[in-house]
Image (cartoon, rainbow, N blue to C red):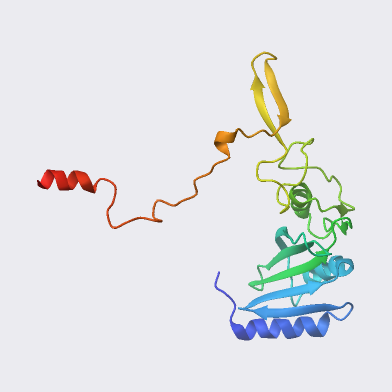
Amino acid sequence: MSYPDKKFIVEVVELIKSLLNFCDYEISNSKNEITIMAKQKDIFSILMFLKDNPSISMESLIDLTAIDYPNQEKRFILAYNLLSVSKNLRIKVKTKISEDVPTQSITDIYPCANWYEREVWDLFGIRFSGHPDLRRILTDYDFEGHPLRKDFPLSGFTQVRFDDELGKVVKEPVKLDQDFRQFDSLSPWEGMSKYLPGDEKSKNSND
């Protein structure tokens, strides 16, 4: 599938501006990528419009993900990546949402959003109202926290191990021994002198 040319992208942007007049939004075209930034309450209507309008026909939801900005009032940006196979066109729809405010599920528009929304809930903690079965999908049901939030510790909150005395797997708080807290992150290509390890052997052999 070839990429659409610049003229076609400009025409699509103008078409969306002329048709999408029932809500407030910002539309941009950067490097031939169309992005629509909208309010959270309008996302459902905008996605339905982009899918059902025959001039645009965004029939596929390719992906749904989030970006975490923990220092902002509206902590997350929710991003919907849409594809029109018939038009050879991609559009990103984004919205800013707060941590404690659920957003409307779009499973009635794109059934594949069922698993995408479960993944976003599992990894970011974003709730979707009206979702038919909002459960964790990648972590255990009793997992604590949401791993893709930027304030989630790299080592996690708990660890599991097999207890020989109990004869079963147990879960306990993470404990790192002091020996494993000193990480050497120096690349083998950094701080290297003009002499490489092993050069002394070559020198001895020449003698």
Q: Quadrant of residue 192?
A: bottom left
**Count of numbered marks:** 0
Image position of 59 (left or right of 177): right
Side (left or right) of 176 relative to 76: left
In the depicted structure, whether residue 144 falls above or below residue 121: above
Closest to the observer: 147 or 94?
Answer: 147
x then y, percent, for residue 35: 71, 74
- In the rendered image, the residue lying farthest to the left is 207
Vertical arrangement, residue 172 with respect to residue 14, above or below: above
Q: Residue at x 79, y 35 (%)?
A: 142
Residue at the limit of the structure toward the top, as seen here: 165
Image quarter where the N terminus lies is bottom right
Horizontal and vertical percent for residue 111?
79, 54
| The image quarter in which residue 175 lies | top right
Residue visible at 71% across and 24% down in the picture: 170
Above or below 25: residue 165: above
- Percent of width and height locating residue 6: 60, 83
Residue 182 x %, y %: 54, 41
